[in-house]
Image (cartoon, rainbow, N blue to C red):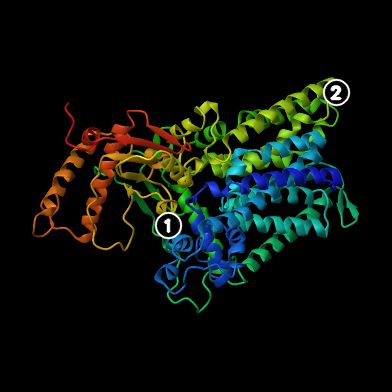
Amino acid sequence: MPKPRPFRLLAALLLATLHVWLAGSVSRHFSCAFDEPAHLAAGVVYWREHDFRLQPENGLLPQAWAALPLVADPDFHPPSTGQPAYVEADIWTLGDQLMHRMGNDPAAVLARARFMIALLGGALVLLITLWSWSLFGPAGGLASGFVAALSPTLLAHAGLATSDTAGALGYVAALLAFWRLCHRVSLARIAVAGVAAAGLALAKYSAVLFPPIAIVLLASRLLRPADLPVFGGRVRGARRAPALLGAGLAAVILAWGLVWAAYGFRYSAAPDGTVSAARFFKPWADVLMSPPRRIEHLMADGTLLPGHTAELRPGPVQAFVRVAADARILPEAWLYGLGFVERHSRFRFAFFAGDWRGDGWVAFFPVAYLLKSTPSELALHLLGGAGLLFGLRRPGGRRRLYRCLPLAVGLAVYAGFAISSGLNIGHRHLLPCYALAAVLAGAVCAPADRTGGRLRLALVAGLVGLHLGSSFSIRPQYLAYFNFLAGGPDGGHRYLVDSSLDWGQNLPALAEWLEAHPAPGPLHLAYFGTDNPAAYGIRAQPIAEPTPPGAGAPVPPAPLRPGRYAIGATPWQRVYTRVRGPWTPPYEARYQKLRSWLRTLDRPGPKLGPDGESLSAEELAELFTDFDQLRFGRLLHHLRARPADARVAHTWFVYEVGAAELEEAVGPPPNP
């Protein structure tokens, strides 16, 4: 990529600035996304305590980067390190304390942290624009820049204090830096490649995909007979191989050293001798699957549904982590994070198009890409790739295709890995693919004959205009964007939820709607998130929520009452409940049995189980949870059969439920 000229750099900077503003200016509209408090708490601890045990699986770099303005603020109050939650690396408790219990202003905390990630999003748009410009000229660069800057997918995650944008930036930067190193060996390019590789390794564990990509790119460069500039001289023929291997090894050594530097050149994740009995949130044995174990998730009726079990056995990643830990090749926290990510990619519950599984679907990411990209984005991605291939016969076509090789290889490897992975909890894991596809979109503007070029530029201008309209039509609800194939944003819940739609971010929208539509009676809330609804003025009875650890003696679920029910899209699809799929006779039998049993608990004497058995406190709590989940499942079975009385921010289903309807929904068995 040649040195940017002033106009090119200015245009790219303007597009990057637009992206930063679009992403960063919507923070006030959203509550915490599910993962944000944990990311920020981890980042604060990294800076203040140099303790890397907390959530290393989500990348040291993005968490520390997002937390930087917090630790620089003298009025910010971090969670205490003198508590069991810190010793046990309970990041969720610490995150809740940071946001809600330390006297910090949650809106200000989120706005500052999110702006830091928006800056990374702007850097990604800048890189996309400049790379495309170098390949396809000014029109191609601007087309790619507009596609990326206005993408609802990239905007949604550039506006959240999570690690996905940092991972996409690291992936694209590492690809480009290594490809440039393959064509000119210099100290500057070795340094840039090493820094980019370290950034990727510290941002996301998709860094493990980079070695095979590097091998393919290196082989492709050696197959091309062109000379290799090396430190001002030129190397020909077979002598290019040791020069490139040496340069690559130097970049790897630099990246390795920078990773160690990020962890303070310390193997131990905990500061040595400063944290008594310190440990990771999950033990090493669980991460390494030693011994092998079977995972089973029982439903509330005692059954196991298909896709709800898994056999976890150590694989190549666990073998590498063991060897690397024994030899202390990499810091402990980095190795733990790698093992944690691989272990949880094997089996993680998710919802997709009316199905629930823990081992994923091959169609998940292709369908997510088709449904959550704007139509113009899809067209430009595909037309760019097609234009590159059909342009082979034009002058410079083969050379242009060769220069785009890292884009094609990076897309193929990452997309193939994503499709084969069982980690299907969010469309956000495709962000690197969106970035690389945006660069390729510029190929539709590659130089052609005058008439054809004008037609293509007119087509691209029209598509970019439509893309702009799609992006602004969903603003500020970028995360909820779905195109017409899904029935628009209000139809997306039929296919994807969780971090693809409802990540707990829309409490302000619900609070605003409730204020504008007051109603008598209580409010019941089924919320998937880590924020505090009461902080937004939402006074509600929670339903189908797990009992937090240490909550004391188990208490029966509170009775449901006639009134208003607000249900988030993720609980509406019952992703993380014990009642999934259709309401079945076994569910009904179990529900009625527990419903009758609960009436007996008011009698004096010991609390016996539904079959007359003695119960420990833990067993009693499990029965209460089963009943709460079954009651919620039966309620949803009834409510899903009729339209919601209101939809709020595409993620909330609101129902007005009277006494008669409530009795029908959760009362005695219905007539046959």
Q: Nearer the viewer, mark 2 or mark 1?
A: 2
- Residue 574 position in % (x across, y down): 36, 40
Amino acid type assigned to the residue bearing label 2 in the image: Asp
* Residue 61 point in image, percent of width and height: 61, 59
| Residue 352 relative to residue 546: left or right | right
Residue picked out by circle 2: 449
Label 1 Cα crowd, 10 Å radius (few <14 / some 14-19 / many 20+)? many
Q: Residue 104's spot in the image, x, y percent?
A: 50, 63
State the residue at coordinates (81%, 58%): 188
Q: Quadrant of residue 575?
A: top left
* C-alpha gap between disc 2 and disc 1: 60 Å
Quick check: 49 left or right of 168? Answer: left
Say whether disc 2 or disc 1 marks the residue closer to the N-terminus.
1
Q: Is residue 540 left or right of residue 335?
A: left
Give the amino acid at mark 1.
Met
Q: Residue at 24% x, 33% y: name it.
A: 661
Q: Mark 1 highlights which residue?
A: 289
